[in-house]
Amino acid sequence: MEQLSARLLALSPSATLAMSQKSQELKAQGLDIINLSVGEPDFNTPDHIKEAAKQAVDNNFSFYTPVPGYMSLRQAISDKLKRENGVDFAPAQIVVGNGAKQEICNVILSVVDKGDEVIIPTPAWVSYFEMVKLAEGVNVPFLCGQDQDFKITASQLESLITPKTKVVLLCSPSNPTGAIYSKDELAAIAQVLAKHPRVIVIADEIYEHISYCGQLTSIASFPELKDRVVIINGVSKAYAMTGWRIGYCAAPLWIAKAVTKLQGQYTSGCSSIAQKAAEAAYNGSQECVETMRQAFERRCDLIVSMVQQIPGFRLDKKPQGAFYVFPDVSALFGRQTPDGKTIANADELAMYILEQGHVAGVTGAAFGAPACIRFSYATSEDKITEAMRRVKECVEKLK
């Protein structure tokens, strides 16, 4: 008899991974599926990074690694944070893990107790909510619509803070919207948080280098929040290294020690070879990062222009970063498919587009925004053009 834990039963499966799996199943049936559901650069890892990994193999980096990561990699990350973000985190304050995803979960499990509240401006990445559930915390989502560029204001944040608030989770550039908080917006948020010394900020900056509005500001750079901000980042998006599974948290020392303690009990240190590759990514030329960023911006311009021509899709502005568009599709709810089925919500619209147009997106409900659908444009311009042509064709068939 199956006897799963209540902890596991409380979790929802990842909607992004579920849609990607569904698209793979249809591909296996011989259908020409364009998968825009997963957030993964289609570029190959740059050659100098691959060479560093090969050299690590030859140099016998094949033994267990320190739980928080090699000191040389943590030093490279420390240098990067000072050089690019103007923030000081000593190597001892940095923990390297199996992707940014693990490090976010590690931090939440380390600081959130049962009943603690975690404020999550939505739309937000699907896994945040489930990680809070795992920690037995209380999700406090706040929906920020297109009319405010998908970003929470300082006054809205202040209205949500209670004596039970333990964490505020910010993602900039955002998955799924591509929204970026400006320096002034973050300054106002920092002023609010300065009044609440118990509240910790988790700043998910994994899309940092995929920005179309210049240098970004990290909320960790505001002195009034010193020792209360945890930066989450990694190599997956900027360096096209999703499969290498290297992310990190840069945190107050007490949190870094807690994360190391937790990680030491259930995964230990991550891949030795991947760590040496990541070290080369941070210490080497950054030209590859800019080349990929420029390609993403061209793709962004293309998909935005096409989405804005699809009847019933609302996308007011070009995203400022990341590689997603997140149009509001609620104008199509209540419409009928050619076979007479009524589209009740974004879940059904996404499935209709997948089954009839053979294009995979992800329902916005998974991100806390049930009026929207997310499409990733981390693919070629030819595929984007064909995918949006198919989506438009599907939508135009609705009655």
Image: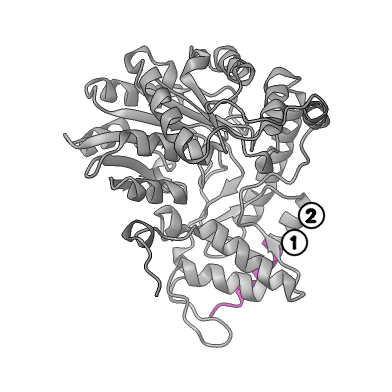
The answer to the question of whether label 1 and label 2 lie on touching residues, with beta carbons closer than 8 A, is yes
Label 2 environment density (alpha carbons within 10 Å; few <14, some 14–19, many ≥20): few
Q: Amino acid at mark 2?
A: Asp
Q: Which mark is residue 382?
A: 2
Residue 358 visible in the snapshot: no
Depicted 235 relative to depicted 190: above or below? below
Residue 372, x across and y down, in percent:
47, 58
Q: Position of residue 348 (x, y in %)?
A: 49, 72
Q: Position of residue 308 (x, y in %)?
A: 59, 55
Q: Position of residue 182 (x, y in %)?
A: 46, 26
Q: What span is colored magenta in the figure?
A: 388-399
Closest to the observer: 348 or 262? Answer: 262
Q: Amino acid at mark 1?
A: Glu
Q: Secondary structure at mark 1?
A: helix
Q: Identify the residue shown where x is 61% and y is 56%.
A: 307
SS at mark 2? helix
Dot 1 corresponds to which residue?
Answer: 386
Instruction: Please indicate whether residue 299 sits to the left or right of residue 165 in the image.
Output: right
Q: Nearer the viewer, residue 77 or 180?
A: 77
Between the residue at mark 1 and the residue at mark 2, the CA separation in whole angstroms equals 6 Å
Where on the picture, by quarter, is residue 223? top left
